[in-house]
Image (tube, rainbow, N blue to C red):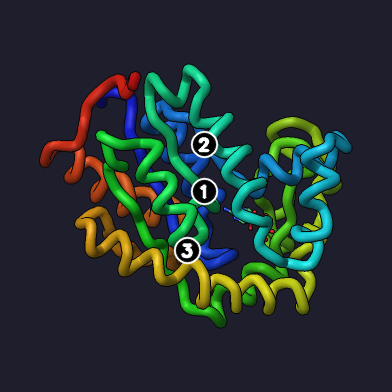
Amino acid sequence: MVPGSRLILLGKQGAGKGTQCTRLSRHYVVPHISTGDMFRAAIKSRSELGNRVKQYIGGGELIPYEIVMEAVVERLDQDDTKARGFVLDGFPRTVHQAETLADILDPVPVDLVIDLEVPTQVVLKRLAARRVCTDCGANYSTDVPPKFDWTCDNCGGEVIQRDDDTQAAIQRRLDLYERRTAPLIAWYQERDRLVKISGRGDPDKVTDRLIEVIDKRRAAGGRHGGYRR
Ligand code: AMP
């Protein structure tokens, strides 16, 4: 397997994007870029960016375009991303963001955009049970907790329920997903970049399904190796 790929995972909150992006990032040796993790880290470190985004995240609102793009452009400009590509998680979230991303990446588009499909009643259940590490962002649940007392198995960080996994914020985020993010499915379909994959069932099986479609796309003419612009 030649390292390097440019991937985007779309899907409702709780569809399993975080878990699957971490695995794809290891498999294809590309950075996992999660805008949600970037903003939560900024809030935790009390940086200026953190102060600017805190209110939006807490309420389940989308962060304004300019703030998001500033953070994403800075991240995409780093050497690891330029050399090997990326797996994007939580970005783009609007057609406006997708258009700007396409301009930034021009002339080499993303290899594949995967819509991880999970029915709403399933994600509602998953979100209520979801717990995350405040340090590395690893996902757990009340059904599959860390081994020791809500301490992360990977990094020893504290594992908690996210502030925006409350009933009201979840509803708001799912609503925003339908209105602002779901139109990206048609947008990428029109550009022949999109594949739909079921995100239901055993996470290992979901990973196998993802790798199968990504490898197929890579074999059919995706770029191999470096992406240096
Ligand atoms: P996530 O971890 O992807 O669910 O993101 C958590 C929160 O971060 C979202 O509810 C938004 O408030 C904010 N956020 C993350 N990514 C974006 C984005 N691409 N555009 C706007 N807001 C975002």
- Taking the image as shown, residue 37 lies to the left or right of residue 225, namely right
Residue density around tag 1, few if under 14, some if 14–19, many if 20 or more, within 10 Å:
many
User: Which sits in the foreground, 130 or 98?
Assistant: 98
Q: Quadrant of ligand 1?
A: bottom right
- Label 1 – label 2 distance at C-alpha: 7 Å
Q: Which residue is mark 3?
A: 11
Label 2 is placed on what type of residue? His
Dividing the picture into quadrants, the one containing residue 111 is top left
Q: Which residue is mark 2?
A: 32
- Which residue, as the protein is rendered here, is positioned at the far left? 220
Dividing the picture into quadrants, the one containing residue 50 is top right
* Of pointers 3 and 1, the one earlier in the residue sequence: 3
* Of pointers 3 and 2, the one earlier in the residue sequence: 3
Q: Position of residue 204 (x, y in %)?
A: 43, 51
Dividing the picture into quadrants, the one containing residue 115 is bottom left
Badge 3 marks a residue whose secondary structure is loop
Residue drawn at 24 percent across, 50 percent down: 213
